[in-house]
Structure formats: structure tokens, C-alpha cells
Image: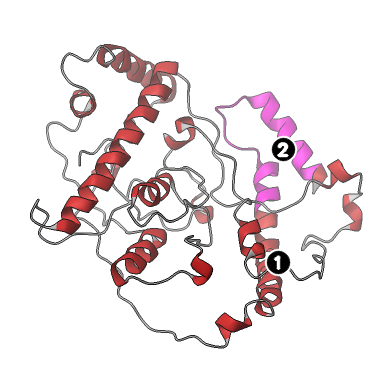
Amino acid sequence: MNEILSRGLEDERRTGPTSRRSSFVLVQHYIGRLAHHIRAIKELLRDTQYLSHVLDNYAVCKIYAPSAVPPPIRDSHTNLRGILNRMFKNNDSERKMLEGGLLHLDKVVGIFKDFLRPYDGSLLDVHAEVQVLEYFYKMQKSFAGDDRFIACSKPACLCCEMYLKYHPARVMVSSSHRKIWTKWSPPHVQRFDNENPAARQQKDILTKMTQDLREQVITHVLQRLPSNRWHPDSITNITDVRQFGISSDSLEVSGAETPKTPPSTYSRIHQSRSNSPPDTDLSDNLDAETEFDEDSGSQNGGVPLFDST
């Protein structure tokens, strides 16, 4: 495996940061993902002996997923000038600089080429993290061990990360691959007006998300940096054995058994939170769609990056 990765990294050093990922790097990642299914089952079975008080007393019931908001409608303002109007006041000194930066990035990497694709009328989707958060919050459910953390099978997207961050439930922000899914949606709120507390709460969350995104976009564009390479949503989970001086030929892909020392009830869960892809800046997020969809699952997620709230 180390030989495959070494060849991949050598390929990428020759081609530069804006090219596609090396086939060797992708093979190494997908082999790691296949092996992860074996490790995950073993880990789950081992954890049962430490969580018997939960597994011996539980009930399974069906809950209904919240509906998404209607998809945005393209109009005459869905263009560069419309973006700038929503991001800046008319007399904002940074407006002209950002316009120049966006035009520069468009010439370099063509960021506007697929800009209108999210407006094709496709249905939006409320991601799993947001569904769990809203269910626990509205139903006033308690977290096991008072551990206010929501985890899914993969790190969260950027919009989910920020939605959890600014939600009044104050749950721990999950690890994030920090990609933007343009079909992401917040839960649909009936009667979206100032008389409805749920509407006011969601508007406050989305306003803070928009402000956060605005600052990230401005910082990235003014630096005039192209997008970084595509990176997977999930982690490869193959240890680089070279750092331990171990021959990779002596190891199975599925990995060695973990120590049998019983951890505390929730320590194993906490440890898994650190296994997330490294944080990336917005240069990764501009690359919202890739040709490696099988690693990212469904693309039915969210609102366009510059949509108004």
C-alpha cells in the first residue's frame, strides 16, 4: 500500500495542484474504504460489551424526516452582480476588489462554469445530521451520558457543520470535510414569518451561517487562490506504517486488532471524533462537485453558496 501511495504522490508532484488526483492515490483511498467496512463491524461488536446498559434497554421507532425548502428559482439577479449586491452594501470598499478577484478566479479555474447548475429544479435534501439535531431539540430528547454530540457515517459537510455550530441546541460540532453540497437544505418551516418562533430561530441560524460564509468567501477570493485538489469526504483509514519502521508486506489491509484494555464507557466514541480529514479553507469548498461521486454518496443536498436568506 505504501508503494501505491508513494507512486501517487510522485505523480501529483509532477502534475501540480490543479490537476486530477492520481489514480494511485484514488486506489489507495478506495482500498482503505473497503477495509473500513471490516474494521467498523469489529469495532461495533467490541463496543457492545461496554455499552450493554444502552443495548439491553432500547426501543426502535420510526420518525418522519423533515421536508426541505423549495429549490431556489433562477432570475435576472442570478449573476455576478446579484451575488455582490447580496454580499455588500453599495458603498462597501471591498466590493470592487472582490469583483476583480472573482473575475480573476473565473479566468483561472472557471468558477462560474457550473454556477447555474444548482438551479435546474432538482429537489433539495435535509442532511442526516440536521435531522437528528432538530428531532432531539424539538422533542427535548436527552443525549446518552449527556454527551451532546451528533455523529454520522462520514464527516459533516460545511453547511451541516455551521448549522450545528449556530443552533441553540449547542451540540458539539461534528468533524467536517468542509465541502459544500449545493443541494443542501435546512428543514422547511411552515408559516415562515416573524410571528412564528421556529421561523425566527431558523432565520437567525441562517443569517449567522451566511455571515460566516461571506467572510470565508471574501478572504479566499481576495487571496486569488485557485481551488485545491479534490479530496474525499471520508477518511482512508490506512496507517502509514513507514513512520513506525514496519514493513507493509507483513500487514493485512484490514488492520491489526486493537488492544483489549477496556476503555471508559464513552472514550472509544470520543476517540473516533479525531479521525476526520484535515480542515481545509474555502479553496476546497469552491470545488463543490466532483467526478468521484461514489465517495460522497447522494448529491441531493442544499442551497447555493450565494443564495440570500
Of 96 and 213, nearer the camera is 213
Q: Residue at x 29, y 17 (%)?
A: 99
In the image, residue 253 sits, relative to residue 283, either above or below, namely: below
Look at label 1 and name its amino acid: Arg
Q: Position of residue 125 (x, y in %)?
A: 31, 58
Residue that appears at 76% across and 71% down: 262
The answer to which of marks 1 and 2 sits earlier in the sequence is 2
The residue tagged with tag 1: helix, strand or loop?
helix
> Of the residues shown, which amino acid type is indicated by label 2?
Gly
Side (left or right) of 194 relative to 3: left
Residue in view at x 49 percent, y 45 percent: 291
Query: In the displayed structure, would residue 190 be above or below residue 24?
Result: below
Image marks 1 and 2: residues in contact by CB distance under 8 Å: no
Q: Quadrant of residue 22?
A: top right
Task: Give percent across and percent down for residue 217.
Answer: 37, 28
- Residue 108 is left or right of residue 82, and the answer is right
Disc assigned to residue 102: none
* Residue 131 appears in the picture as rendered: yes
Question: Is 185 within the magenta?
Answer: no
Q: What are the residue bounds of the magenta stretch? A: 3-29
Quadrant of the image occupied by residue 18: top right
Q: Is residue 11 magenta?
A: yes
Q: CA distance from mark 1 to mark 2?
A: 25 Å
Position of 261 with respect to 74 (left or right) is right
Q: Quadrant of the C terminus?
A: top left
Say which residue label 2 marks: 8
Q: Residue at x 15, y 17 (%)?
A: 90
Residue matched to label 1: 39
Where does the image place residue 290, in percent across and percent down from the top left? 47, 43
